[in-house]
Amino acid sequence: MNNSQRLAKKELKNARHKLEIFMYFVCIIVGLLIITGSFTTFLSLIGFSYIEVISLIVVSPIVIFISFYFWYGSVKAYSIRVSEKNFPEIYLKSLEYADKLGLKKVPAVYIEQHNGVLNAFAAAVFGKRYAGLHAELVDIAYMENKDFNPIYFVLAHEFAHIYYKHVTFWHNLMVFPSRLIPIIGSAHSRAREYSCDRVAQLLTDSDGIYEMMVFTVGRHLYKYIDVDDYLKTTKMERGIWTRIINMLVSHPITQKRIAALIDPEKKSGSLF
């Protein structure tokens, strides 16, 4: 694929998890039920009074709005923005991915150390969308293995969140109340992660397997993993508790995520 070739909208639409939009509307409906009081009895049973529900309705938009800007201020205060002179390889990839996705503005990319935690994120404030990479992850490219592939795949994944508007204020406001209900909100989040993994594959021409291994065994050992053996052993270790954990977390557990990445038919990953 030519670096300047833009991905077709149909291709990006097909990359989206088949249940992501459905789960988004489920979250909205659940939120509306909470707001209208239809879930008041249920919420009371799990410890929420009517006053607390009303307070949640009033306070949630304010809290989300402030948290967005507080987070943005914190990122700018403690990180380094990727540029032509600081981490130019990553900067050029941000230009490439923004162009391939047809983004009107190139999202800023920030790097900040997080005391050993390997992670990345995408976020937004009004009029600006940006991505962050933990320095411990970027070490893989510049210090550990001189391997840029994991960084590029993760960056592509975060840009996909921006493309699908997962990071916007309104998107998060609409799904915020559903986070009170176990499984529903997390299922929507897992669907979003599968969608962005698939877009990352399109942007990088990589299957993303070793990139995901980074988050399992860390930046030192990921290249030593035999993926076939890993998948074989995880099949033997599946059980009810593994399923329960997967249902409760915001990101698919690694074995399900990799199974989706290597699926030759590129089907949507398993949510449950």
Image (cartoon, rainbow, N blue to C red):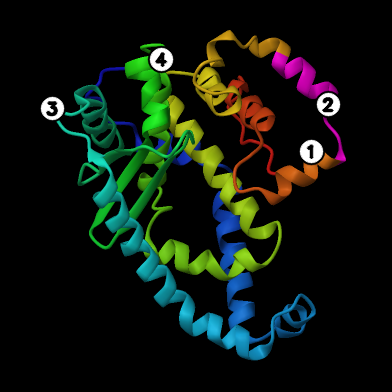
Q: What type is the residue that disc 4 sits on?
A: Glu
Per the image, label 2 sits on a secondary structure element best described as loop
Q: Is residue 82 left or right of residue 221?
A: left
Residue 242, which numbered label?
Answer: 1
Question: What x and y, as percent, mark residue 176?
Answer: 53, 67
Q: Are marks 4 and 3 in contact (CB under 8 Å)?
A: no
Pointer 1 or 3: first along the chain: 3
Viewer can see residue 272: no
Q: What type is the residue that disc 3 sits on?
A: Lys
Residue at which label 4 appears = 144
Of 71 and 172, which appears nearest the observer? 71
Pointer 1 or 2: first along the chain: 2
The residues colored magenta run 230-240
Q: Is residue 19 left or right of residue 174?
A: right
Residue at which label 2 appears = 237
Identify which residue is drawn at 80% across, 23% down: 235
Q: Are marks 2 and 4 in contact (CB under 8 Å)?
A: no
Q: CA distance from mark 4 to mark 3?
A: 21 Å
Viewer can see residue 210: yes
Q: Residues within 10 Å of mark 4 (few under 14, many from 20)?
A: few
Q: Main secondary structure of the magenta part?
A: helix
